[in-house]
Image: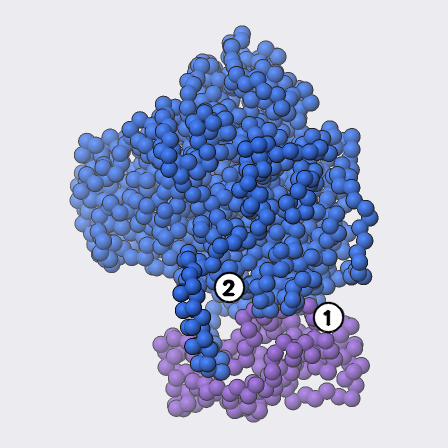
């Protein structure tokens, strides 16, 4: 927790996801379909930055890498051990928000790990998912707060979506 | 050795034993069985002494205080431009095809982010029908072979590809001047329309050149036999699903024979217990070795291979005498020494059966036997009115013939050839010994070797050009019945090598063209109708072009040929010692010698790993005065080969069975030192069997790693005396008639009091409950499941030394049990993986709860918790748990790491592992279904072993779904559980094996002048 490594390019989620309001899924495309959230390819950055801030010094590395074809060497922040297999889509599709595990990313200049991400921490939610569920449409709306009817809503959504988070070892350990 | 006191065995007098040591209760066997993990083994390949121990302790103490606390920085490297359809973490599947001699296998390959990791069969392709053999599964390791050649070599120096192109262009100009009169190419089988087209173009460019093809294991005899019978080089395609009675004459059609995958599936259709009384077929096998087909047989006769022709002649005369319409065969009797009773009963059974009979002859038998069999088959199908054979011939494919090689060597000897190109062919290793190809090769001024490794032939050539693996190339293939398929690459050539067709194109035109263009060119005319691109994409996507299958030929027998064949067959054979060559069940002709998975895969019958041996029957061994592992020198003409003996019960007398493919010299680290090369004994007049053999005992002993006595199922520990009572409970067999009388025999075989647990049992009524049923009726013992599991679950290769200590890591093993007499046993196979017991004995004893039960019935293994106590393995009655004694992946080359499945954890040293019912596949399917908002249905989750089994012997699924296949199988009365009386309640169960012997026949017969009765 508190791990906040320096990235090769000072990309600010606060600017892009927060102030500009770009949805998480614009860049992290794999999050609803597969196990990994996927850090975007350089092409996604250049979608805008070929036209916007084309002379910015901060983006120099991006432009260089785009030209040369070498990928961007981002530093990984959130990691579970290799023997634990986490699947993003199984969580995002039932209404677990990015915020539950990654915190208020839209307020971070630099990404920092704010949750433990330990097995015990995961099990806290798996044993009682109710406080962490929200309507699927609000998953990337990080400012959303649960309302007073959270308990009823949670019960309802757990029933309709058949939410049964595994608490057995085989759920994550393969 | 005194014979073990077997006590009274309760089940129909049937005894079971796993090896000859077991049978006689030798001291070595007892010692091995008592200790699952033999002691005295500490370091991988090293001896530990006190000094070293203290050194190690000292080193680790010194390091204890120095590691930093922060975890290492890890990078995420995304794409620069993401490929459109790849989502990291979700594998994609692509159809491709693999050429294999003159057959081809349609495959579906799983690819993770552009890196192929698992090969499976393409259900739409006729040669695989969805399954894949052990060798096909292991091809993925051939792709990632660190010993593959990576650069163009001239002599020993690396050169650039452009240099070779330049060199060839010069040579080509020279050879064009005399239309290629001094040019020769020796290749393997030419397979696929593009290759054929290019070969044709080559012959147009160089009309005087020689293009010879040679495959060391080939179907020449069959084709020649058919040519004599019908005037055309045809292949008989057997309709096993239509034949009620099958006689196999030295044809291992279930494993090493041609079209084995397809034949297994068709055969199983008539074997499995759906309605056994009406449908179950009967298999007679007459062979000299002990093949898997022989193991499946209801009646087996072991005679030397040279006597199979005379056997067929004798049978033919009996059939004619009993009324079969065979106009060309003369009347009368020929005196034979074959068991009259066996022949008479066989005759009767073949004739009486109204539902189709079939005689299938193996590739080892000379053409005359095939011709004669064709005539008999025709007579039989006329009599029954059911045709069980189809004759197919892909007229477009050039099927290799030995004459090519012989005429090429003639030209070489006369010094006519200036340039010889070896295109994926290795004659120094595989060519018939009397040709002395190595010498011929050195006499040619320009030699170019094209191959995946700089092998025995490549070492001698001037140039060596690496070829790409089929998983890296564009190409096309043609299967036996002419079905075309496209080979599409799963990954760019790892070392920038060229594909075979790209090379041939260069040879022909002197100009480079990509494989993609070449293949598309070949298909442009073929794909009619809709736009070419659309049709092309469809064929590439499907992996098969079904419209291309050749229809069968109508054939007309040539009576003179049959007469001649008959008189050849009726010749009395030589007696005396005989050697019999068979392609290795793992390494085939040697092409897989550098493949770790296949080297470690125990040979299905002998259970030997990493080595071949001279297989002899117990009687022959006694005659020669040898025991297991004694090294003998076998001489045939001017060649002598030394290798250790292994006694194999059930072999024909006076026969030594030798496996091809071992003793390779320049292939790589895995192949080095493994086994003995027996090709020096193989001459063109005795490619499959030969007499004029002398054997000398050298007095030295070899060391063979055999797994047959490992992981003995709780034998000595639990019930010393009752061993013979126990084994019939583990493998439950009966004849069809016994089953008809006692349909519940399988369940009744074990008597035990009602099973009650001391504790409250878990309720498994809800959700998915995974279970597995294995049908012993159709399991052929091929071990495809074992290798598929190894591929899917990243199971390490441990090497010969460790295997000899019982540390092979296969999660699912094939247990092979002999039953009956030493001289003429029957064989049954049983695949055993983790049984996922509901009351698992392994779970309660883990001190750290590293192995626990989940809600769906799986016994899960949590590797990071395991501290390596090994108590769980101690408690497991099935001995299915495997321990990582060493860090087997420490020195795994990076390229081999690419073959690993990223969805399965790589295990470190000190951690227990075992079959997980492919939990990664279960998870993946569950998540996919959940995301789509639906439940899993039967067939959504397919374990790796189930997926690849050619006969669908393994069935996996949800027990809580009454309509699932596995639930249906478990309800059959043949269903039983292994060691059920221990009340472990395993989720895996077995369907007892039924044999279908002919009541009038003795259950086994032996020829020659034997008069024992057992």
Is residue B63 shown above or below B231? below
One can see residue B266 in this view: no
Q: Nearer the viewer, residue B981 or B154?
A: B981
Which quadrant of the figure has residue B564? top left
The residue sitting at the top extreme is B332
The residue where tag 2 is placed is B909
Give me the residue at 37% from left, 34% from top: B699
The colour one sees for chain B in the rendered image is blue
Residue B841: image x %, image y %?
A: 69, 57
Residue B309: image x %, image y %?
A: 47, 20
Give me the residue at 76% from left, 36% from top: B745
The circle drawn on residue B415 is none
Residue B587: image x %, image y %?
A: 44, 43
Give me the residue at 75% from left, 41% from top: B750
The subunit letter for the residue under badge 2 reads B
Cα distance between the residues tagged 1 and 2:
34 Å
The residue where tag 1 is placed is A164
Residue B566: image x %, image y %?
A: 47, 15
One can see residue B345 in this view: yes
The residue sitting at the front extreme is B50
Is residue B911 shown above or below B23? below
- The chain drawn purple is chain what? A
């Amino acid at each position: 927790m508190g791990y906040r490594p320096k990235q090769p390019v000072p990309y600010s989620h606060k600017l892009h996801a927060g102030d500009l309001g770009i949805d998480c899924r614009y860049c992290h495309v794999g999050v609803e379909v597969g196990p990994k959230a996927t850090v975007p390819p350089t092409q996604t950055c250049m979608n805008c930055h070929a036209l916007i801030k084309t002379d910015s010094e901060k983006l120099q590395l991006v432009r260089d890498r785009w030209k040369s074809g070498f990928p961007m060497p981002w530093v990984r922040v959130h990691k579970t051990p290799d023997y634990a297999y986490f699947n993003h889509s199984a969580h995002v599709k039932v209404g677990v928000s990015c915020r539950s595990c990654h915190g208020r990313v839209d307020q971070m200049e630099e990404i920092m790990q704010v949750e433990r991400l330990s097995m015990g921490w995961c099990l806290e939610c798996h044993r009682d998912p109710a406080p962490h569920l929200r309507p699927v449409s609000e998953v990337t709306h990080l400012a959303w707060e649960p309302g007073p009817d959270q308990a009823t809503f949670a019960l309802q959504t757990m029933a309709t979506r058949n939410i049964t988070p595994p608490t057995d070892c085989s759920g994550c350990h393969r | 050795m005194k014979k073990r006191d077997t006590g009274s065995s309760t089940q129909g007098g049937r005894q079971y034993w796993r090896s000859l040591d077991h049978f006689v209760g030798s001291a070595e066997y007892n010692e091995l069985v008592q200790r699952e993990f033999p002691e005295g083994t500490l370091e991988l390949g090293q001896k530990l002494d006190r000094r070293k121990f203290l050194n190690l302790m000292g080193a680790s103490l010194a390091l204890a205080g120095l590691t930093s606390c922060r975890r290492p920085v890890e990078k995420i490297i995304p794409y620069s431009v993401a490929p459109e359809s790849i989502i990291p973490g979700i594998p994609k599947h692509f159809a491709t095809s693999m050429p294999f001699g003159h057959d081809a296998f349609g495959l579906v390959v799983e690819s993770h982010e552009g890196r192929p990791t698992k090969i499976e069969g393409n259900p739409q392709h006729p040669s695989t029908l969805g399954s894949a053999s052990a060798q096909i599964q292991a091809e993925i390791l051939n792709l990632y072979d660190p010993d593959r050649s990576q650069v163009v070599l001239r002599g020993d120096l690396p050169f650039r590809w452009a240099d070779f192109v330049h060199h060839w262009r010069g040579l080509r100009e020279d050879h064009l001047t005399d239309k290629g009169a001094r040019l020769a190419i020796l290749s393997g089988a030419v397979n696929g329309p593009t290759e054929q087209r290019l070969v044709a173009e080559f012959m147009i460019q160089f009309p005087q050149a020689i293009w010879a093809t040679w495959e060391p294991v080939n179907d020449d005899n069959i084709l020649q036999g058919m040519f004599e019978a019908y005037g055309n080089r045809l292949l008989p395609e057997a309709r096993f699903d239509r034949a009620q009675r099958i006689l196999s004459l030295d044809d291992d059609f279930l494993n090493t024979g041609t079209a084995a995958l397809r034949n297994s599936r068709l055969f199983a259709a008539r074997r499995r217990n759906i309605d056994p009384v009406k449908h179950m077929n009967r298999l007679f096998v007459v062979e000299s070795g002990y093949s898997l087909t022989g193991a499946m047989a209801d009646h087996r006769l072991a005679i030397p291979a040279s006597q199979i022709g005379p056997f067929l002649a004798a049978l033919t005369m009996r059939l004619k005498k009993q009324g079969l319409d065979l106009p060309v065969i003369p009347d009368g009797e020929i005196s034979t020494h074959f068991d009259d009773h066996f022949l008479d009963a066989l005759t009767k059974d073949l004739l009486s059966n109204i539902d189709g009979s079939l005689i299938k002859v193996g590739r080892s038998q000379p053409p005359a036997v095939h011709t004669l069999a064709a005539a008999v088959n025709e007579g039989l199908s006329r009599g029954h009115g059911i045709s069980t054979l189809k004759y197919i011939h892909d007229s477009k494919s050039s099927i290799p013939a030995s004459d090519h090689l012989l005429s090429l060597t003639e030209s070489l000897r006369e010094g006519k050839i200036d340039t010889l190109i070896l295109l994926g062919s290795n004659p120094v290793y595989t060519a018939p010994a009397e040709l002395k190809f190595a010498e011929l090769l050195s006499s040619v001024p320009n030699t170019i070797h094209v191959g995946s490794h700089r092998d025995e032939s490549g070492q001698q050539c001037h140039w060596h050009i690496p070829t790409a693996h089929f998983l890296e190339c564009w190409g096309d293939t043609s299967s036996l019945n002419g079905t075309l398929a496209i080979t599409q690459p799963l990954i760019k050539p790892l070392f920038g090598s060229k594909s075979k067709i790209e090379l041939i194109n260069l040879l022909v035109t002197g100009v480079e063209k990509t494989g993609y263009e070449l293949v598309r060119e070949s298909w442009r005319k073929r794909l009619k109708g809709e736009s070419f691109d659309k049709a092309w994409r469809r064929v590439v996507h499907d992996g098969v072009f079904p419209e291309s299958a050749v229809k069968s030929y109508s054939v007309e027998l040539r009576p003179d040929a049959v007469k001649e064949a008959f008189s050849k067959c009726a010749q009395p054979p030589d007696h005396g010692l005989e050697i019999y060559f068979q392609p290795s069940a793992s390494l085939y002709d040697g092409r897989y010698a550098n493949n770790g998975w296949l080297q470690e895969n125990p040979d299905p019958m002998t259970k030997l790993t990493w080595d071949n041996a001279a297989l002899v029957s117990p009687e022959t061994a006694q005659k020669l005065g040898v025991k297991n592992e004694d090294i003998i020198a076998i001489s045939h003409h001017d060649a002598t080969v030394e290798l250790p003996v292994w006694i194999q019960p059930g072999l024909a007398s006076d026969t030594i069975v030798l496996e091809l493919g071992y003793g390779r010299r320049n292939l790589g680290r895995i192949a080095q030192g493994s086994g003995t090369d027996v090709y020096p004994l193989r001459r063109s007049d005795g490619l499959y069997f030969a007499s004029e053999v002398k054997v000398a005992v050298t007095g030295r002993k070899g060391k063979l790693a055999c797994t047959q006595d490992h992981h003995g199922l709780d034998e000595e520990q639990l019930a010393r005396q009752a061993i013979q009572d126990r084994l019939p409970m583990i493998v439950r067999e009966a004849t069809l008639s016994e089953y008809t009388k006692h349909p519940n025999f399988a369940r009744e075989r074990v008597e035990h009091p009602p099973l009650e647990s001391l504790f409250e049992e878990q309720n498994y009524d809800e959700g998915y409950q995974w279970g597995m049923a294995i049908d012993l009726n159709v399991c052929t013992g091929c071990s495809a499941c074992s290798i598929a599991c190894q591929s899917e679950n990243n199971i390490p290769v441990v090497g010969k030394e460790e295997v000899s200590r019982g540390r092979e890591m296969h999660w699912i093993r094939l247990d092979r049990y002999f039953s009956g007499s030493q001289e003429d046993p029957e064989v049954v196979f049983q695949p055993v993986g983790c049984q996922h017991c509901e009351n698992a004995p392994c779970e309660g004893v883990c001190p750290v709860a590293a192995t626990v039960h989940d809600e769906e019935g799986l016994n899960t293994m949590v590797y990071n918790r395991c501290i390596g106590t090994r108590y769980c393995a101690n408690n497991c009655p099935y001995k299915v748990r495997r321990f990582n004694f060493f860090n087997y992946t420490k020195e795994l080359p990076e390229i081999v790491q690419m073959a690993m499945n990223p969805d399965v954890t790589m295990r470190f040293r000190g951690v227990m592992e075992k079959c997980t019912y492919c939990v990664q596949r279960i998870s993946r399917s569950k998540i996919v279904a959940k995301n789509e908002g639906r439940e899993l249905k039967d067939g959504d989750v397919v374990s790796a072993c189930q997926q690849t089994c050619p006969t669908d012997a393994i069935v996996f699924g949800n027990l809580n779904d009454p309509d699932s296949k596995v639930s249906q199988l478990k309800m059959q009365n043949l269903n039983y559980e292994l060691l059920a009386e221990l009340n472990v309640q395993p989720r895996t169960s077995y369907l007892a094996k039924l044999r279908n012997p002919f009541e009038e026949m003795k259950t086994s017969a032996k020829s020659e002048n034997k008069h024992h009765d057992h």
